[in-house]
Amino acid sequence: MCRFLFALFAATVLGLSPANGNTLEDNSRGTVSSDTTGFSADTLALVDGKRLLDEERYDLARERLKESAQSDNIHIRIKALLYLNELEVELENYDAARVHLEEYHIEAMRLFHHVTDMQHEMTEQMATIDKRHRRLVSGVMCAAALILVGAVLVVVMQRRRRVVAKLSATDISDWHRYKADVKAFEQTGIYAEIVDLALQSRGRGARVMPLARQEALDRELAVGFAHFAVRLQSEYPSLTAGDVKLCCLSLAGLSTWARALCFGSTETNIIKQRKYKIRRKMELDASGKSDPRGTALFEFIFADRRTSVGESILRGR
């Protein structure tokens, strides 16, 4: 019933405008004719039939309205059928009136479905446009992200080259020695314990390295990184034993989380705070002036590096 009322409303609002008559297609009668003369004749027949109906000249009105009911224009057909129904009701020919009403209903529903199809088509077109727009935005964002990552990589590589350029020949040789020291440290049992601790889920129940194992780690670092630790303390005597320990763990490429566990804590802020203090101690010489060599050495120690497959896992956490 609601669809029928909607179709009746659509037919009434659209009216008999010639401009509207050429825009819709009647599936049962073929494409709407674009013949202006024929369309005008159908309109005149409808108007003439309505006038005769108002004048109660029913026979002539029926003839003219039936003529317009054969129009290729769906709006004219709907109006003609409605007037024919009104005419037969006036003459109390209810069977004929019911037939015209049923035909009117069929035409009105055909118009309703046509309008609905147009609406669905428009909705699909809008969805397609929106989908293309989202794809375009996603593509632009991905391209921007790739450009940003590329720029960051370029900056990191340039910074690393500057660091290496600032280091002396002795520092470069220490770099090669460090690689051997790290490889040996990765084969120790204490390193396997650190990897196991770092792979656990973070939270209030996370395990940290016990005090006894921390002392064992200190002894292992003192042996495995002896050359580097001695040189570091001799050149920067203000560094504490804990500072040197953090430098050795950083040389080994351990993550901030893993290093915090080695200090018996689950808070990574303690590592960041100690790292800041080490920077301050190494960037200034004995006279309090800026020391470029100390800055380069600090960046070398705390550079983001991955020393093994296990460490790749740690860095990914």
Image (spheres, helix red, strand yellow):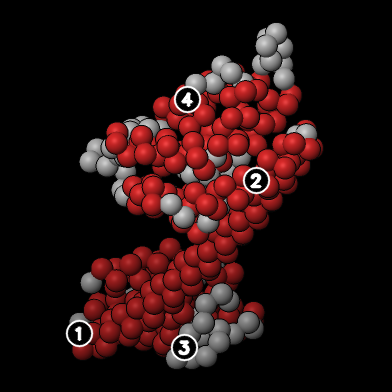
Q: Mark 1 or 4 closer to N-term?
A: 1
Give how far across and how far down residue 173 sits, in percent: 72, 42
What's under tag 1, amino acid-wise?
Tyr
Check disc 3 and report its element: helix, strand or loop.
loop
What's under tag 4, amino acid-wise?
Ala
Check disc 4 and report its element: helix, strand or loop.
helix
| Pointer 4 with pointer 2, Cβ within 8 A | no
Q: Mark 3 or 4 closer to N-term?
A: 3
Residue 102 left/right relative to 177: left
The label number, if any, that marks residue 94 in the structure image: 1
> Which residue position holds label 4?
241
Among all residues in the image, which is located at the extreme top?
287
Check disc 2 and report its element: helix, strand or loop.
helix
What's under tag 3, amino acid-wise?
Asn
Say which of marks 2 and 3 sits in front.
Answer: 2
Label 4 crowd (10 A; few <14 / some 14-19 / many >=20): few
Q: Nearer the viewer, residue 122 or 55?
A: 122
Q: Nearer the viewer, residue 104 or 197?
A: 197
Residue 126 left/right relative to 208: right
> Which residue position holds label 3?
27
Estimate the spatial distance between the alpha carbons at disc 2 and disc 3, rounded to whole Å. Answer: 87 Å
Give how far across and how far down residue 185 sits, in percent: 49, 49
| Pointer 3 with pointer 4, Cβ within 8 A | no
The label number, if any, that marks residue 177 in the structure image: 2
